[in-house]
Amino acid sequence: MPTITAFESSPDRGKGQARDMRVRWALEEVAAPYDVRLVSFADMKAPAHLALHPFGQIPTYEDGDLALFESGAIVLHIADRHAGLLPTEPHARARAIAWMFAALSTLEPPIVELGMAMLFERDKSWYAERLPMLQDRVRVKLGDLSRRLGDADWLDGAFSAGDLMMVTVLRRLNASGLLDEYPEIAAYVARGEARPAFRRAFEAQLAVFTGARLAP
Amino acid sequence: MPTITAFESSPDRGKGQARDMRVRWALEEVAAPYDVRLVSFADMKAPAHLALHPFGQIPTYEDGDLALFESGAIVLHIADRHAGLLPTEPHARARAIAWMFAALSTLEPPIVELGMAMLFERDKSWYAERLPMLQDRVRVKLGDLSRRLGDADWLDGAFSAGDLMMVTVLRRLNASGLLDEYPEIAAYVARGEARPAFRRAFEAQLAVFTGARLAP
């Protein structure tokens, strides 16, 4: 059974926006049991954790001799080893993986930049001038994504690891209000959140924050 | 033979920092011939290109019925189909893929943010105050990367697609001067640039800028 790491004390107070959520959700989609080791911010910068994760972050994934870091790589590894997260047809599989990269490489950077500014630059003299610029960078991507999605349920055929990554990245906009401007995308995120595997993963990470014990 | 897209008029004036460079390099490493279709900025936002790339960017990759976007996905697809870019041993393969994601997800965002500020915010009132903050975010990642690399030639055993992505991402720091602070990383980038496949890819993209015709 693999072991993943997650924040002992999540900065988002259980909103499920830390990157362990992606890995939990993937494991729930394929019905693979897993253990969680919680780490403090001090643990993350200690040698034992840096040996697993060179950048001192979460999540990590350990399974026997294999140790991985980067949520994208971990989700892809899980999708490679279990049915249910990637199509078996090679071209469809490659396209689903392209959506994983699009989520992490094209959507997440401007979304994180906006989120960081909202958290850490709110009291700066430039905040009022930079905020609309950062919002517009995200809007361009959301507009493109919305046009491609159209009235489809998922990005390319059936639900895949590409949708899983995209939904978790888009959820980082919850506090920004921007998703309200793109109802198709808000509905897409809601479809992801309604999946039973998402719910189980969400409850599991929330239980860490509330200190609840989940039924075994 | 696959066809990729690249800028008709590269904003970096042939420095090889556009994302087609990664795909060219990967194709050169595995000795796979390819065609290039050059696109203007207007072409990139036209329906024909948006059908290939929902976000209207380069590179794309077309091979028969398959159309892909995202440089990470394209390089992974090439690495899956040809020997030479990923280890065959499954655990080593998964770890090399983790380095691809680390390059795109952990290193590239703060590097691009710094580069964007240096290009577009130099005349803003806040530039002098924000610049050191952006530089320090990159330094944290370079410090972590440098510690992990140590005196090894490559990130995890033999050269892999993980190194290919990392070197192309780190090259985006060329104008920042930050690589000079990390001699091990500067030497790592130089090792990548010295590979014959890198040189061939670099010359090919430079020829687009200079208008030169390469020998067939």
Image (cartoon, coloured by chain):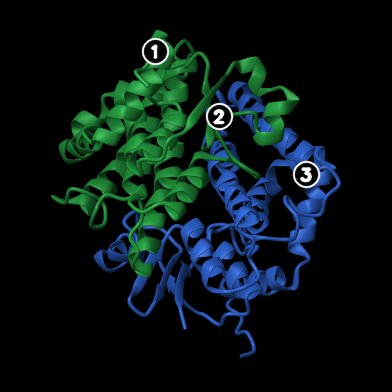
Chain colours: A green, B blue
**Amino acid on which the number 3 mark rests in the picture:** Leu
Protein chain holding label 1: A
Protein chain holding label 2: A
Q: In this picture, is B79 found above or below A172?
A: below
Query: Mark 1: few, some, or many residues within 10 Å (few <14, many ≥20)?
Result: few
Do circles 2 and 1 both sit on a common chain? yes
Query: Mark 2: few, some, or many residues within 10 Å (few <14, many ≥20)?
Result: many
Disc 2 is placed on an element classified as loop
Could you give the CA–CA distance between mark 3 and mark 1, rounded to whole angstroms? 40 Å
Could you give the CA–CA distance between mark 2 and mark 1, rounded to whole angstroms? 22 Å
Residue contact between numbered discs 3 and 2, judged by CB atoms under 8 Å: no
- Residue B28 vs residue A144, the one in the foreground: B28
**Amino acid on which the number 2 mark rests in the picture:** Ile
Residue A58 is marked as 2
Disc 3 is placed on an element classified as helix
| Whether residue A121 can be seen here | no
Protein chain holding label 3: B
The location of residue A190, given as percent across then percent down, is 20, 33
User: Which residue in the structure is indicated by mark 1?
Assistant: A213
- The residue positioned 51% from the left and 56% from the top of the image is B72
Image side of residue A25 versus residue A50, left or right: left
The location of residue A187, given as percent across then percent down, is 17, 36
Residue contact between numbered discs 2 and 1, judged by CB atoms under 8 Å: no
Query: Mark 3: few, some, or many residues within 10 Å (few <14, many ≥20)?
Result: some
- The residue positioned 40% from the left and 23% from the top of the image is A129
Image side of residue A29 versus residue B12, left or right: left
- The residue positioned 83% from the left and 50% from the top of the image is B152
| Whether residue B2 can be seen here | yes
Residue B71 is marked as none
Do circles 3 and 1 both sit on a common chain? no
- Of the numbered discs 2 and 1, the one sitting upstream in the chain is 2
